Image (tube, rainbow, N blue to C red):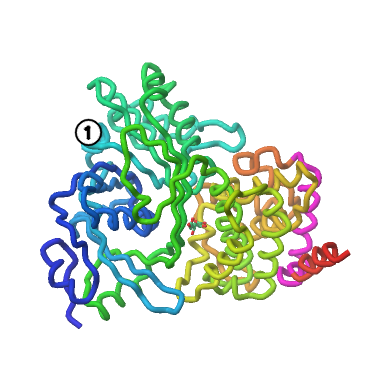
Amino acid sequence: MESIKLNTENLGRIADSVAIPLYDRSKIKAGIVHVGIGGFHRAHQALYTDQLLHKKGNENWGICGVALLDFDRKIYNTLKEQDGLYTLIVKELDGSLTTTVIGSIVDVLYAPEDPKAVIEKMASPETKIITLTITEGGYNYNEATKQFDFSNPLVQHDLKHPSEPKTIFGYLTQALKLRKERDQKGLALQSCDNVQGNGHILQSMLLSFVEKAEPGLVDWIKKEISFPNSMVDRITPATSSLDVTALKDTMGVDDEWPVVCEPFKQWVIEDDFITGRPAWEDVGAQFVNDVVPYEKMKLALLNAGHSVLGILGALKGYSTIDQAAGDINIARFLGLYMDNEVTPTLGDLEGVDLKKYKHSLIQRFGNIYIKDQIERICSESSAKLPIFLLPTITAQLKTRGNIDFAAFVIAAWAIYSLGLDENGNKIVIKDAISEVLQKRAIEAKENPKTFIEIEGVFGDLKNEALFVESYTTSYYNIKNKGLEACIVDLNSKILNKINE
Ligand code: CS2
C-alpha cells in the first residue's frame, strides 16, 4: 500500500482510512503548555483534549508541547515535521485496532535549542495551565533526606545560569518571575505523573528551589499558583518499529512516531485551577475534591502490580507483561500481594469497588495484544519503587501486617540488578543510578543487606528488623532454590495462614 506522510496538508487524504481531527486546528490557541510529550501524554491528556476540541467553545484549550531534555530531540523533530499531528492506536481487548489522528498539540518547542521561547510561552498571558509528565524521578525528591535534592548537578547549573535552565524547576522559576514582573495572573501547575500527592510534591519541590533561586518569588507563588493533584491512568507501552510499519502497510499512514495503548483510560483531577480550565469532564475525566484515595489505590495496585510482574518476570526470562501475568504462579503471587499486603493499607475508598478494580487490573495486565515491555516497566525502578511499593511496606509494618511478598520483590530486584536472568541471559538495566544498583547487587551476594542500604531509595527501611529479616530470607531462598519454587512456597504459606 502506498503511504502518505502525516501532516496538515495531507490530512484530507488520510481521512479515508483513519479518523482525523474535525475541528479547524488553525483557530486553536494553546492555553495549555505541556512538558514531556512522550507516549503517555499523547495517549492520555492530549487525547482527552482532542476530544474536547471537537466540542464547540473550547478553542482556547489547545496544547503547546515542550520537549525539555536533549534526549527529547527525536520526538520534537517528529512532531514539528508532522505539524503536531500523530496517530493513536488503541489495541482493543479482542485484538482489533482503533486508529485516530490526534490534533490537540498545536505547537511544539524544543527547550535545549531555545530556552527563551519556552520561558516566554510559559509566561504568556494565553497560558492558563502548565501540565507535566516528567517521570517519577523528575521531581528531584530525595527519599533519604525527604527533601529537594540540591546535589543534582543540573539543579546546580540552574542556580548558576538562571536564564538558560536545564531542569523544569529552573524553567518554571524564570517563567513565573516574568509573570510576576509583568503583573500578570498566575496559573495552575498540574502534575500528571505517578507520584502520590503529585500536586503537593510539585509545589513543595518548586518552592524549595525558588527559595534558593529567587526568594522574592515565594509569596507570589503561594498566592497565585494552584497545584491540583491528579491521578492518571492508561497503559502505554513503548512504540515498536512493528507498530510503525503496520500503520504504514495497513492504513497507509506514514507517521514516524505513533502511540499505542490499551483501551482503558482514567483521569481523576482535583478541581483547583486558579485561572480556569477546560471542561475535561465533558470527555470523561472526573473532577473530585480529594484525589488522594484514587492515587493511592492506583499507585499501590496498578503501578506496584506492574513492578511485581516486571521484576519477577524479568528474572524468569520473560520480556512482556502479559507473559508474566500469564504465569500461573506469578499471577497468584500478585493476587495474594494485592489482597493481603496492599488492600489493608488502602482504608476505606468511598465509592470504589476495590474487588472489581483488582479484577480489572488482572485483565489489563493480561491483555496479549499490548505486549507492554518488561524493560519499560523495570526502567527507573529506583525512582518508582519508593512510590509504588515501599509505602505499602511502611504502612504494613506500622500495623504489623504481612510484608513477605513485598520484601520478596525487593530481594528479587537485588538479584535482578546483577544483570542476568535465571537462564543466564543478560538483562539491560535502565536506571539513573544503575551503577550504584549493580555495585550494591554484587556486594549483596556476600551480604544481602547492603542493597537495602541505598538510602536514596530505601530511606531508613534498613532499620526495620522485620523487613530486613524477610528480605534476607527471600534473598537466600531465591539464590538457593530458584524463583519459581520460592514463589510457590510463599503462595502456599500465606494461603495456609489464611485458612488456619
Ligand atoms: C508503569 C506505568 O512505568 C511504569 O512502571 O507502571 O507507566 C503504567 O503503565 C501507567 O501508569 C498506567 O497508567
Q: Nearer the viewer, residue 271 or 409?
A: 271
User: Would residue 74 be seen by someone viewing this image from the given angle?
Assistant: no
* As drawn, 40 above or below 450: below
- Provide residue 133's location: percent of width, then percent of height: 40, 47
Horizontally, residue 327 falls left or right of residue 463, namely: left
Residue drawn where x is 65% and y is 53% of the image: 441
- Provide residue 132's location: percent of width, then percent of height: 38, 44
The main secondary structure of the magenta stretch is helix
| Bounds of the magenta segment | 463-487
Horizontally, residue 189 falls left or right of residue 406, namely: left
Secondary structure beneath label 1: loop
Q: Name the residue under label 1.
A: 124
User: Would residue 430 be seen by someone viewing this image from the given angle?
Assistant: yes
Q: In which quarter of the image is the C terminus?
A: bottom right
Residue drawn where x is 80% and y is 43% of the image: 465
Horizontally, residue 151 falls left or right of residue 130, namely: right
- Provide residue 162's location: percent of width, then percent of height: 32, 27
Residue drawn where x is 49% and y is 30% of the image: 204
